[in-house]
Image: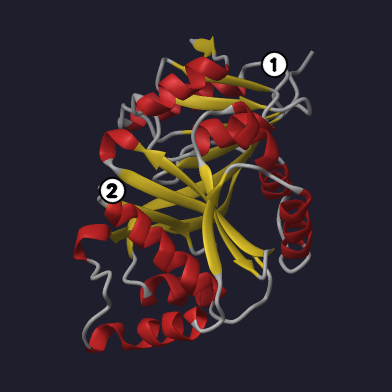
Amino acid sequence: MLKALNKDEIEVAQSEGYMCEHLLCLYSTVAYKTELYNDTFPVFSSKYDEADVVLFGLKQDDEDRLGCVKYLSKKKPIKTLNIISPEPLNSLPNTELKYTVLDYHINVNQFDINMKGKKYKSIRYRINQAKKNDYTVKLGRNFSPSHIYLLSRHMTRRKYDAWDFEEMLSLERFLREHNHGMMMEVYKDDKLIGFDVIDFFENRKIMIVPLGIYLKISGLSDLLMYENLKYAKENGYIWLDVGSACGEPKLRRFKEKWFAKPTYKICVQSMKIPPEKN
């Protein structure tokens, strides 16, 4: 049922379409063990009797999803199973819905990179103001002490759960161990002030922006969004996946300002597996 994956197999699985995201590689840097259920659903196990299963795979049948969850719920030593799926699985016992979010995409072909017209007025103003600050934008893969400094500042401003912390703290390892993924970086006077992590799903021509790490500087996130769209358009990507709004109205309004539309739903449930009776 479960097939263990090494680093090279993880990259092949991602490219063949097991997930429409960067997550197969990024999660694998956090997890103690990465496996595939029936060559379809990624399973990430920790050393602490906990596992995550991502039910976005090649098969879209509810019976396949339920079969996967039932199998994992009987697999030792898992005591907590986190289920990420397009819809909540309502028939499961001892399961709590933690949250539901919408994942947002921008249609690159429909975005005017010259930002002409009334509907671009707000973002055109923000970008023009940012350009007056003589920022320098670069692509990089070297995770330096400056990146760690920004990451620590960023992490103190929001409340994250344990998995989010682990994911962000694994960024250096992600870039070091995998041969794809980059950072869109912004510098002011040779000082790094913000960066987006970017990755690519080549089969569907999707550019993914899963994480943005910034200092609190007005217009910085707008500038990076514009640079991401510009890069995506110049390199033939059709969609820019800008992730979810994480339940934050301010973040949702920011994405919608850039004409991002909700593409699909992500539900996260937590199943507590009771100990077996003697």
Asked if residue 206 can be seen in this view, the reply is yes
Looking at the image, is mark 2 or mark 1 nearer the viewer? 2
Question: Residue at 54% of width from left, 15% of height from top?
Answer: 5
Query: Which badge, 2 or 1, is on the more N-terminal residue?
Result: 1
Q: Quadrant of residue 57?
A: top left
Could you say which disc has been placed on residue 76 in the image? 1
Question: Residue at 23% of width from left, 89% of height from top?
Answer: 118
Distance CA(mark 2)–CA(mark 1): 42 Å
For disc 2, the marked residue is 237
Could you say which disc has been placed on residue 129 in the image? none
Q: Quadrant of residue 25?
A: top right
Question: Residue at 36% of width from left, 38% of height from top?
Answer: 201
Q: How would you rate the neighbour count of disc 2 (Cα within 10 Å): few for under 14, some for 14-19, many for 20 or more?
A: many
Question: Residue at 25% of width from left, 67% of height from top?
Answer: 111
Residue 26 at what x, y percent from top left? Answer: 57, 36
Residue type, label 1: Lys
Asked if residue 247 can be seen in this view, the reply is no
Q: Quadrant of residue 115?
A: bottom left
Residue type, label 2: Tyr
Residue 23 at what x, y percent from top left? Answer: 51, 38
Count of numbered marks: 2
Q: How would you rate the neighbour count of disc 1 (Cα within 10 Å): few for under 14, some for 14-19, many for 20 or more?
A: few
Q: Are marks 2 and 1 in contact (CB under 8 Å)?
A: no
Q: Is residue 234 above or below residue 115?
A: above
Secondary structure at badge 2 equals: loop
Secondary structure at badge 1 equals: loop
Question: From the image, which quarter does the C terminus lie in?
Answer: top right
Q: Is residue 52 above or below residue 148?
A: above
